[in-house]
Amino acid sequence: MTTFLLRVCTILACVSVGLTSVAKAESDYRISTFKADVTIPLNHRCMGVLPTKSKKVLDPLEAIGFVLTGPEKPIVYVAVDWCEIRNGAYDQWREKLAKAAGTTRERVLVSSLHQHDAPVTDTDAAKLLRDVGLEDELFDEQFHEIAIANVVAAIQLSAKHSQPVTHFGTGQAEVHQVASNRRIVMPDGRVSFSRGSSSGANEFMSQAPDGEIDPLLKTLSFWNEDQPLLALHCYATHPMSYYGRGEVSSDFVGLARRKMQLGFPEVVQIYASGCSGDVTAGKYNNGSPESRVELTNRIYEAMQESWQATEKTPLTAVDFRSTELDLNYYDHAQLKRKHLEETLNNKSKRTEDRILAAMSLASLDRVESGQRIDFPCIDFGNAQIVLFPGESFVGYQLMAQQMKPDSFVVSIGYGECWPGYVPTNKSFADHFHDKWLWVGPGAENNIRQALKRVLIKEEN
């Protein structure tokens, strides 16, 4: 914890990135950018249930975002180099950031990038674990408070350096040899979702087709006349080359983001993971350090191409819409309350199994309390940002773009993460199942209706 506390003093330097003064322009909108260090301390659990805790920090974890102000209440977006933020922790992030920015919770969009050598936070699960003597096993609760406080302080400081926004930009480029779908057809004709992040060392996995992916990296940018202020890049893939060795890292997407930041020091660079629950680098990654470098460079090249392809549009209006999304808890035998409580309270069980039981109970409690998921859209006219819950499959991202084929839809995944994987109907029909799956069949129908409400401006 001492090491982390020392990093708090870097916050003033962090938030200054991209805030070089430019000439004032007349605009109804202003933007401020912020950045804070949220690197976990050593001996901290990663991905919620990995048995090897953090041993060293290869590169820092960051929370990077913006506050957009205009005629209505501010809109906040932040991308966090964490695996997942769930349940009460997700509420906590949004409430505290909303207060710092002078807005409401529904207008705060928080997404994780989902690196696995990074934390999962869930304050509801943490309480359940604390009650059975497993305090700080899921995540360090004091660290979590400090991390949020760092982001809050960064937001407050950034308000002093806001800039007019006169234009937004859109650009996209194809990413080569990174993404592949988990779904493969085995030699015996059986459908499997076993192509994980580092499956490229297996000849069959590396030779199987890419499957369903979205090959495009999209870049949405904000400008003050000819001065670029911020670039938000989004691409759909699990962001892991290798993990589980106790080496904290933002992995190849975070490393690519930093290369862009070095190349364009006056433009704040944000990266967000798209809907990629069923998309990994498994076809093109063998889990070696060399593969991490190759994947970093491929994402970086696409970022550069997307940036070069940017076309600007005057920013005349920003419309914020949000609807409530109802996802059903997956009520199968392993997720029944009685079974979960028995696992949580059984001291002979592995700590990791008890943690997973607590996370499951926290999600069950969430659903039974009637709290739904906010499903927001920021509409700039011919471009939109939509935030999806959890590990939504790439089919949802493709669905969103198909609903507005003439628009530039940036689909971001890993918002409220309690659902875990969010498969499509097709994937459920293919018998997708995983211990990280808390929603059942039928999720696609509810998401499709929610998308229509926020993207096509139907009445909520």
Image: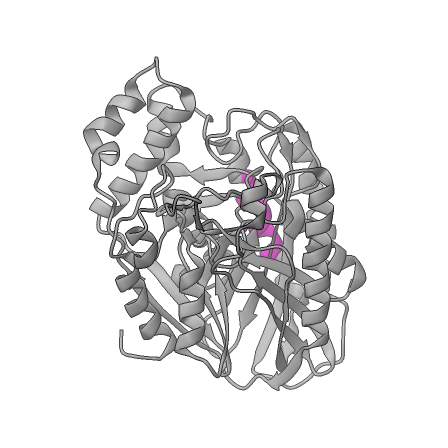
State whether residue 290 is above or below residue 407: above
> Can you name the residue that lies furthest to the front here?
188
**Secondary structure mainly formed by the magenta segment:** helix
Q: Is residue 301 left or right of residue 31?
A: right
State whether residue 243 is above or below residue 61: above
Q: Is residue 77 left or right of residue 221?
A: left
Q: Can you give x and y, in whole percent of width and height, for residue 289 in the image?
A: 71, 39
- Please state the extent of the stretch shown in magenta in the rendering: 146-156
Of 160 and 244, nearer the camera is 244
> Can you name the residue that lies furthest to the top here?
348
Of 401 and 114, nearer the camera is 401
The residue at the point 41 percent across, 39 percent down is: 122
Magenta-colored stretch includes residue 154: yes
The residue at the point 68 percent across, 42 percent down is: 60
Q: Is residue 139 visible?
A: yes
The quadrant the N terminus occupies is: top right
The quadrant the C terminus occupies is: bottom left
Q: Is residue 392 left or right of residue 97?
A: left
Colouring rule applied to residues: one colour
Q: Is residue 115 visible?
A: no
Q: How many marks?
A: 0
Magenta-colored stretch includes residue 108: no
Q: Quadrant of residue 200?
A: top right
Q: Can you give x and y, in whole percent of width and height, for residue 151 in the image?
A: 58, 50
The residue at the point 73 percent across, 55 percent down is: 297
Of 321 and 201, nearer the camera is 201
State whether residue 359 is above or below residue 257: above
Q: Can you give x and y, in whole percent of width and height, for residue 293 in the image?
A: 73, 47
Of 435 and 115, nearer the camera is 435
Q: Can you give x and y, in whole percent of width and height, for residue 440 in the image?
A: 26, 49
